[in-house]
Structure formats: C-alpha cells, structure tokens
Image: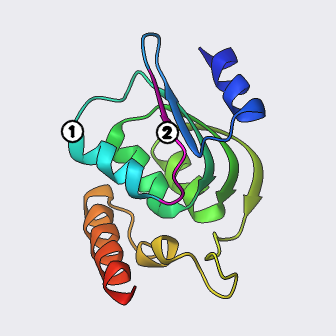
Amino acid sequence: MEDNLKYYIDTLNNTLVLVSDTNIIENKERGIGFLLSLVKEKKDFSKYIAYDKVIGKGAALLYVELGIKKIFAKVISEPAYNVLKDNKIAIDYRLKVPNIINRKGDDLCPMEKAVLNINDSKLAIIAIETTIERLKGAN
C-alpha cells in the first residue's frame, strides 16, 4: 500500500490521495474543502494512508477526526506536525515550515489562522466551516 502512495507523491498532480487495501480516493482541488467533505461523510478512514501536498493545522485536525493513522506530506506546518504527533498519527514529510502562508503570500493561510489556537478537532470543524462561509461571502 505504501509503495502505491509513493507513486502518487512522485508522479501525479493530485493534492490529496487516500489509499486503503481496497480503495483509492483522489482529489485535485486546492484547499481544505474536499477533506472537510470527507469528514462530513462520517465514514471510518482508519484503514487509509494519506498523501497530501500541503498540510496546515486545519487539515491536520480534520485528519484526526477522520481517524487516519499515517500521512505522507510534501509540505507540513509546525502546528500541523504537532497536532499529528500529539494524536499519534505517523507522519513522513519532505519539508516542514513554520506556518502555511496564504495564496497571496502576505499572511497566514485563512484555515491555519482559523484554528491557530484550537486543538480539538470538533471545534476546528466549526472554525473551518465558519471561515469558508466568510471567505465565500467576501468573493
């Protein structure tokens, strides 16, 4: 299973891939929305290994809620790394950064900022949903 995941890391343009012994879930969209939609399905993802291009603290808290046990990341923020470590989720990454920066490059990612002081995955879901709605209203 991990060999398949390394294939995704090295060759495909997905932003998120979840692999189990019997299923592969792929996502090419940027942002945290797809991961949030998986959380809302309330399915058991504990048998999956995840590959994620960029993991901020918001995504890390969603992975906790999903029950994921192992993650490979190209980029992970220090707060996300700490969440995963504290929740006993195995993490392998290529680059650890202090924080995830927004797309303009002038501030923290809105999702990282929304959960900066939150360590409970259920509270993080509320903060992430509120931030997404606020951002939709700003566009």
Instruction: Name the residue beneath numbered marker 2.
Output: 88
Q: Which colour scheme is used?
A: rainbow
**Residue 13 point in image, percent of width and height:** 67, 41
Mark 1 falls on what kind of element? loop
The residue that appears at 47% across and 11% down in the rendered structure is: 21
Q: Give the range drawn in magenta.
A: 24-31
Left or right placement of residue 80 versus residue 37 in this view: right
Residue 23 vertical placement versus 129 (above, below): above
Which of the 4 quarters of the picture holds residue 117? Answer: bottom left
Q: How far apart are marks 2 and 1 (CA)?
A: 20 Å
Left or right placement of residue 123 versus residue 111 in this view: left
20, 137: nearer the viewer: 137
Instruction: Name the residue beneath numbered marker 1.
Output: 42
**Residue 112 point in image, percent of width and height:** 51, 71
In the rendered structure, which amino acid carries the disc numbered 2?
Answer: Lys
Q: Magenta segment: does it hold 86?
A: no
In the rendered structure, which amino acid carries the disc numbered 1?
Answer: Lys
